[in-house]
Amino acid sequence: MKRRGDEEEMKRRGDEEERRRRRGGGGGEEERRSPPPPADPRVKDLKKKKKKKKKKKKKKKKKKKKA
């Protein structure tokens, strides 16, 4: 159930974002920064499929007792 206060809060939040966007309109940092390159789906799949190999424990050789 939504309360009236929540709706007002959402509206206020939206207004703040709009103001921020307008303020940074004059060639702001956000526009200067280049967007990250689109992630290549193939790379993601490779990372997912790669499994860590378990290291095999070396068996210790038992030393023969000298008589």
Image (cartoon, rainbow, N blue to C red):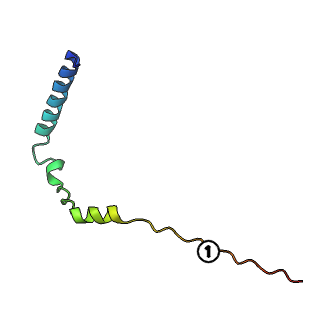
- Of 3 and 33, nearer the camera is 3
Tell me the quarter of the picture where residue 34 sits. Answer: bottom left
Instruction: From the viewer's perspective, tell me whether residue 43 is left or right of residue 66.
Output: left
Taking the spot 16% from the left edge, 30% from the top edge, the residue there is 14
Depicted 9 relative to depicted 27: above or below: above
Taking the spot 13% from the left edge, 33% from the top edge, the residue there is 19
* Quadrant (top left/top right/bottom left/bottom right) for the C terminus: bottom right
Q: Secondary structure at mark 1?
A: loop
Taking the spot 13% from the left edge, 39% from the top edge, the residue there is 21
The amino acid type found where label 1 is placed reads Lys
- Of 42 and 29, nearer the camera is 42
Tell me the quarter of the picture where residue 66 sits. Answer: bottom right
Tell which residue pokes out farthest to the right in this image: 67
Depicted 53 relative to depicted 64: above or below: above
* Quadrant (top left/top right/bottom left/bottom right) for the N terminus: top left
Instruction: From the viewer's perspective, tell me whether residue 66 is left or right of residue 14.
Output: right
Q: How many marks?
A: 1
**Crowd tier of the residue under label 1, counting other residues whose Cα lies within 10 Å: few below 14, some 14–19, many 20 or above:** few
Residue 60: image x %, image y %?
68, 75
Depicted 51 relative to depicted 17: above or below: below
Tell which residue pokes out farthest to the bottom in this image: 67
Instruction: Kindly identify which residue carries mark 1.
Output: 58
Residue 24: image x %, image y %?
14, 42
Instruction: From the viewer's perspective, tell me whether residue 28 is left or right of residue 60.
Output: left
Residue 56: image x %, image y %?
55, 71
Instruction: From the viewer's perspective, tell me whether residue 18 is left or right of residue 60.
Output: left
Residue 18: image x %, image y %?
12, 34
Taking the spot 44% from the left edge, 66% from the top edge, the residue there is 52
